[in-house]
Amino acid sequence: MTKDMTEGNPLLLILKFALPLLAGNLLQQGYNVADAAIVGRFLGTNALAGVGASSSVQFLILGFCIGTCTGFCVPVAQRFGAGDYSTMRRFVFNSFIITAVMAVVLTILCGVFCTQIVELLATPDDIFSDAYIYLLIILLGIPFTLLYNLTSSIMRAVGDSRTPFLFLAFACVANIFLDIFCITTLHWGVAGAAIATITSQLMSGVLCLIYIIKKYPVLHMEKEECAIRGDLMKTLMVMGFPMGLQFSITAIGSMVMQAATNNLGSIYVSANTAASRLKNFTMCPFDAMAAAVSTFCSQNYGAKKVDRIRQGLRQGTLAGILYGILIGLVLIFFGREMSMIFVDAGETAVLDASREMLFYSGFFYWILGILIIVRLCVQGLGYSGRAVLSGVVEMIARTAVSLIFVPVWGFTAICFTDQAAWVTAAMYVVPTCLYCLKKVEKILSEKTDVEVPENS
């Protein structure tokens, strides 16, 4: 069911939209946690390190897929907010064409160069084999990742965040059972964990596609709407690719950080894997709130309601700050105990290192809330190019700390790498968002119909 966010209380609309997204994000991270926990408990810390050794590359490639699909749906949400359903459907059709091409190209390239990717990360010899097979299978599942993220983004663009959550919930439960079955019964090792993950992605993507076909009359296309349009493809790529690149550019810094961690040995790789899984899980509310604010801003831009855009952004950011303070305190005081989800109590060195990473991260989570929510607002307003620059800032900061300070201070410097990236990116994106809001206000005051802004 679709949801118009151009009328009603902004905060209530954003929270109502964000709750299913949050539940879905928690479930999605939940099966990442399940992968790591089952691997760590049943296969040992070396296998856990193998799964985590390439996490930055997964973020680089899969993040590009996720970000691009999210960006594709900005013009869909804008046209929905404006009531221009025919153009909206044309955007949807052309987004499927671009996504299909991406799936073929990325899967072939990643499969061919997987060995070189693992070598580039300076992966220790004792975990190289596990890291390679896990990454290869995950990358071969790129088409499934694209299918789910595009279909779920389309549903969210027209105001339905509940249905993608329900399908994701089913897939997450299936993933946990498949994890246990593939690892403990079939004895497939880390390959079993990867196969379980991509299979569950396929399930959720197919369910979303079937639901769109059967339950969304507003998305049922006429024959003349199913045509490749160069102008619409250009708009989609202007919106989508920069957002995908923003994820990927951020991940480049994470790859440098991952390589620096890998050079410190498998103990620290295991600790980083455990801490990173927990950090990704606790970031889910930020991502849900940001996606809700982005959709809210996109629809109200289409409806030419600038005051509602400002109100929604302000209230969403405040909610993100409050959550960041609360969850930061949890990480500060309970990081070691939380790490025991993945690591046996006897692995004291791994647990101590994981606790250290979570402890220092906790003090900066409120800044991360500002960064994620404000950046997605910039994206939702159509200024993908400016949003991607925040990823560049993150990359530079993360890379600088990894190359300059890790050789001197070791794992302690690793513990501050993310925080340096968050602070510097937030210093860029907040004034950028205010500038974009002024541009939007000027555009809407001068034009009778909302056009997709140039990527500037």
Image (cartoon, grey):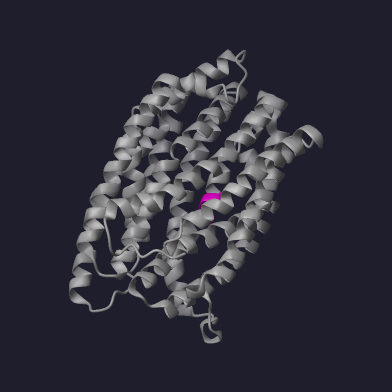
Q: Is residue 303 left or right of residue 235?
A: left
Whether residue 64 is in magenta: the answer is yes
Asked if residue 456 is positioned above or below residue 429 in the image, the reply reads below
Q: Residue 380: where, in percent of width, then height? A: 35, 60
Picture coordinates of residue 239, whole percent (x, y): 41, 64
Q: Quadrant of residue 409?
A: top left
Q: Residue at x 69, y 29 (%)?
A: 47
* Residue 258 rendering spot, x and y as whole percentages: 53, 34
Most extreme residue toward the right is: 186
Residue 123 counted in the magenta span: no
Asked if residue 220 shows in the view, the reply is yes
Q: Nearer the viewer, residue 236 or 110?
A: 236
Decide which of 122, 416 is in the foreground and name it: 416
> Total number of numbered labels?
0
Predominant secondary structure in magenta? helix
Against 339, residue 110 (above or below) is: below
Work out whether 292 lies above or below 58. Answer: below
From the viewer's perspective, is 262 left or right of 75? right
Residue 24 screen position, x and y as percent: 51, 47
- The magenta segment is 61-65
Image quadrant occupied by the C terminus:
bottom left
Looking at the image, which residue is at 45% across and 76% down?
232
Can the viewer see residue 263 in this picture? no
Is 303 on the left or on the right of 38, as rendered?
A: left
Please report the residue visible at 61 percent of the width from the left and 58 percent of the height from the top: 205
